[in-house]
Amino acid sequence: MRFRLFFWLTVFAACSSLPSCTKASFSDYSEAELKQAVLNNDFSFAETVTPVSARKFAKRDAEAALFLGLHLLENGKKEAAETLFESASGLSRKSGRYPQIDDRLQKKIPFVTRVAAFSELCGVLEEKSRENPDPGSLDYLLLLKNISEGEEKAFLSRKEALPFFPWIFDSATGNLAAAILRTESAAIDPGKGNPETDIKKIRALALDKLYDEAAGIFFSLMETGSSGKAALLSSREILSASGRALLYSETDPAASLKALEELEQFLVNSNVSGNFSPEAEYMLTFYKSRICSRLPDGKEPAINFMESSILSAPTEYDRDMSIWYLLDTARAEGPGFLLDEIEKTAGEWTNPAVFSDILSSIITNLTAVKDRENLIRLRNLLPHGVPSEIKERLDYIITMFFPDGSHDREEGLRLLYAGAVTPYYKTRAAADLGIFTNLKDIDPLGLEDSGFDPEKKKAMETMENLFGKQVERLITGTLQWHLPKQAVVVFRDFPHVDFKFIKDTAEQLMEQGFYSDAVRLVSASLALMDSAGRKKYWSYVPVAEILYPKPWETIVTEAVEEFGQGRVLSKNLIFALIKQESLFNPDAVSYAGACGLTQLMKSTAEEIAGKLGIEEYNVFLPEYNIKFGVYYLYEMIQRLDGEVIPALCAYNAGMSRVREWKRDFGDDNHDSSGLFLEAIPYDETRNYAKNIFTFMNYYSILYAE
């Protein structure tokens, strides 16, 4: 008997030292137990998360509450995650159904942690409103809206109530606006003779792209007479929602156009003043043009309406949008017609970057037909402020039409190399000239220095002084709680720490195998600097090696040696391919289903495995994925006579398309792989090959043997 008693006491003592999975309250868990549960993918503790236990836990460690909430959210435990985010925001449910600001809890939680948790909470509520809006939660959402807009001073201490806080809450404000709109319209039964509620319903439906239902309510309002029409004209938001509903629904375009013309006539004839949106004339004309373009014979009136909308545009942004759609309509008529329209409108562009895709498409078309004369004409038309990439692309193409080895081509390439901002054109010019590129001469992100807004820059400096240590602690916590991707999210929301801390954190991420997150973190930090700062830091080899690492080098080396056979395959090329395809994430899966580091479709991997005589493999394991990807690229290179650029394009877009492009482009004295690349009609493929070319050159410079 005594032996049995001793045995059971020993067992009880041993069991009591293990983490408990049946604790009465979430607040009873230790931080060590919760971290271990996360590691074991055991989220049973979510069942014990209550408002009371979450408040106790947040009072003890609000950062841990935030990180646990993120883990729970990733694993589908939304209710528990929401409760933890509430508490980590300094909100608690002392009484009533929804939480209120808890002054005592607020004082315990660092400001940055509160804001981060608040942002996550607003994201959860926005998703809930999309799935099942609860009209009873409106007061709670309005409270949060006041917080996000800085109206609820209790959320901010005096020191924190600086002019920068609306910028911090931008994401939360957008999520809350959507949640409030859905919640307010959830109980609305349209068509009951209340235009004010009907237009709110239209906006909510358009927000979720339920355009057919929104269009139906629009036409019902039109039938109610002047009250319905006046409501539809009352604000820009409802005109925009109605216009999108008519444009993207299954409604007959002719009927939609007639309705907008009827609204326009009502606006002109109405004796009521001050009740209509001042942008009403512009919005109606704009959407009449968009809808006209859907009619069989509507191209000409669409252009006429869009030209009218340019004249009535209330803001510079609106004018740019109208000009963009005018050019987009003209684009279908061919590059000559589009070039004429660019010449007419270029002087009116406020933000030339808006037109980058239009310009890119005409450059591609003119290059494909080798129309150097009109390329030069286009280059001369470009207004000040057009992105450097567009200008440098034109300069490169025009230069490459000179004969190979000519003085004009060499001089053009030298000028391009000396002045290029875009990494591709800097490295491309150097490669064509056969000169060595120094890392110090290259801006790795190719961003133009537009300068910081003085007030925003001052606010950021103030925030770094006030909250830098809080941000550092939060980023460090993301690593401790096994949330590497959140390190990047936190930094983007609170970019208020020095670069050395970011570099050190990125190195820790790399040590743990999180190469993608390390690259993103350093890139995000560099993006906040001017070009001189980026060049300074990235030319420091340890920083460059974070952006261009060489993981799985042994596997890459063996695959290149096995399939290279003296051809143009190289380790630098393969690392560049992996960086472009997956950013070194072995678990990456594309929207199309491509898998792993080299982004192979499962069917492609199966075919390659058969060719190599491999019966069992895992496409996500680097030893298989890299070998298969190298072999696949090797095949592309072989089938395209050893040409790397076309082979990369085939890797991305398929062999048949590349052969068609090569056939269409032709082969004459002007041709080069660089010029062929500029004529490819797929932006994705063209930019894909450019990126790999640039990355390969960086690897060659950084790891020069």
Image: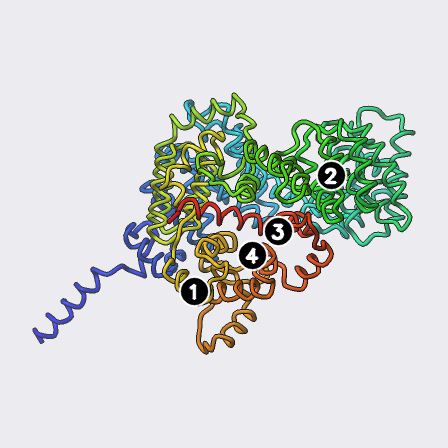
Circle 3 crowding by C-alpha within 10 Å: few under 14, some 14–19, many from 20? few
For residue 594, which quarter of the picture?
A: bottom right
Left or right of residue 355: residue 75: left
Circle 2: element type: helix
Graded by Cα atoms within 10 Å as few (under 14), some (14 to 19) or many (20 or more), the crowding at tag 2 reads: many
According to the picture, the residue beneath numbered tag 2 turns out to be: 375
In the rendered structure, which disc, 4 or 1, sits on the residue that comes first in sequence?
1
Q: Residue type at mark 4?
A: Val
**Can you tell which mark lies on residue 377?**
none
Q: Nearer the viewer, residue 254 or 357?
A: 357
Residue 12 versus residue 357 in the image, above or below: below
Instruction: Kindly identify which residue carries mark 3.
Output: 673
User: Which quarter shows the N terminus?
Assistant: bottom left
Q: Amino acid at mark 3?
A: Ser
Mark 3, secondary structure of its residue = helix
* Residue marked by disc 1: 559
Label 4 vs 2, first from the N-terminus: 2
Instruction: Choose mark 3 or mark 2, whichever is in front.
Output: 3
Tell me the amino acid under the disc marked 2.
Answer: Leu
Specify which label sits upstream in the sequence, 2 or 1: 2
Q: Which residue is mark 4?
A: 644
- Marked residue nearer the N-terminal end (3 or 2): 2
How far separated are the C-alphas under marks 4 and 2? 27 Å
Image position, residue 269 (x, y; %): 92, 29
Could you tell me the amino acid type at mark 1? Answer: Ala
Q: Between marks 3 and 4, how big is the CA–CA gap? A: 9 Å
Asked whether, in this view, residue 146 is left or right of residue 484, the answer is right
From the viewer's side, name the closer residue of 459 and 332.
Answer: 332
